[in-house]
Image (cartoon, rainbow, N blue to C red):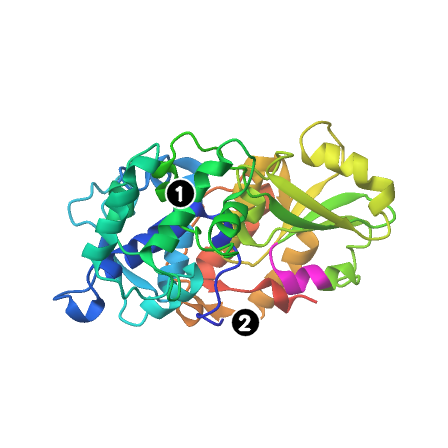
Amino acid sequence: MDINKKPCWLDDQEEIQYLLALFLDGLDRISADERKRPLGITLTIKKFPSLFHGGLESDTQWGLIKNLCYDYGLFSICPCAKRDPYEPEYVGARLIINADSEAILRSWLNRPRKDLPLIEWQMAVDKVAVQFSGETKQLRTYRLNIGDRSCEEILNGFIKISCYLDIPVTLRQLSAACFFGLSKFLDGRERLVYSLYPELTLLPRPLVVNIYLPKEVGGVLFIENQDSYTCAINGVPTGVEELALIYSSGFKGSASRVRCRDGALLHLHGDGALKWRDVFESWWFAESVCDWPVYFGGDLDFSGMMILRSIRERFGQIEAWPLGYQKMLKCLESGQGHRLDEAKKQDQTDPGITGSMFADEVLLPAIRQREVFIDQELVV
């Protein structure tokens, strides 16, 4: 995995973007070289309310935070010593940024290093403060920079947002319209925008879901990984020929808006796209019921089982796909697979119970006993 490449899910996770933006806000105020100790952020309900909601949303966000820690190495996680043992492990945890993470975060969030004196920025903000319907406290706390643009040019972009209070736009569209065509400038800054304009309403950014529909649909299969999805479109492994194939892209299929017409954009293709489009969309958006069996196929690890549990919360009775997982079980029993530490998976969260009988009674006991995982791409 290329740790410099932005995770494919980051654009859809506003809370995670906000978290990473907080690190850069701190580094904008005091650079890493000037700090006596590394920059840290404590996870509290005030800063990250959705993380503390409990249930699927909390599990998903905590899993993604740990992914950024253990797979990308952006920061370390220091558990709170005073945390009650029955509380989730993220309560009071402190994230300490690693020394070489700043450049990666700046690239992901399109936040180049600031070189404007903070006092100059604050004076410029104060001059135009009356033009915002909200308050400018958050805008004053850190410096913003776009190339060699002046403070006034950047602030004019924020002032221009007032022209879009009654025009339905997404955050990316608003950013491009107000900041020199830069669609990603406001990524991670949605809370800042709302603090300036509390009355603003932004359109949700739809999730794009790729779905392959064969000539005849006899069932549905969610597929976690891209390579496995593209192989399945070509009929590998056998047994997928009459299954509608959905590329779930990790936790995308479990997002709260994925079954809302204004929250998901279905990209339907394949020989049966025209024939099955209306029926499939009606089922997807929970407007009708179909008697198709629905399956999930992903990695044979705790994260894959967590995704299965999460998708079941959105789509109901989904089972772990027997054909794919039985092949992985045979690989597991023959000594193939990787230990948890070899793939930095030792901190994956055991989902406990997924709700799928095959997963709960066969798959999870097998990986718990052996402490060995297998990635889905092995099965072809």
Asked which secondary structure carries label 1, the reply is helix
Q: Earlier in the sequence, mark 1 or mark 2?
A: 1
Residue 26, compared with residue 49, is above or below; it is: below
Residue 321 seen in the figure: no
Residue range of the region highlighted in magenta in the rendering: 224-230
Q: Amino acid at mark 2?
A: Gly
Q: Which numbered dot is residue 173?
A: none
Residue 44, compared with residue 70, is above or below; it is: above
Q: Residue 210 placed where, x, y %?
A: 69, 51
Q: Nearer the viewer, residue 265 or 127?
A: 127
Residue shown at the point (53%, 54%) measured from the top left: 304
Residue shown at the point (67%, 57%) measured from the top left: 324
Residue shown at the point (49%, 56%) measured from the top left: 180
Residue ID for mark 1: 159
Residue 195, compared with residue 181, is above or below; it is: above
Residue ID for mark 2: 335
Task: Say if the magenta span includes residue 178.
Answer: no
Q: Amino acid at mark 1?
A: Ile
Magenta span: predominant SS is: helix
Q: Residue 70 placed where, x, y %?
A: 37, 63
Task: Say if the magenta span includes residue 229.
Answer: yes
In the rendered structure, the answer to whether residue 331 lies left or right of residue 91 reads right
Q: Nearer the viewer, residue 272 or 134?
A: 134
Classify residue 31 by image quadrant.
bottom left
Classify residue 137 by image quadrant.
top left
In the rendered structure, the answer to whether residue 4 lies left or right of residue 102 reads right
**What is the crowding at mark 2: few (fewer than 14 residues within 10 Å), some, or many (at least 20)?**
few
Q: Residue 188 placed where, x, y %?
A: 40, 50
Instruction: Give me the C-alpha separation between circle 1 and circle 2.
Output: 62 Å
Asked which secondary structure carries label 2, the reply is loop
Q: Nearer the viewer, residue 4 or 220?
A: 4
Residue 162, compared with residue 60, is above or below; it is: above
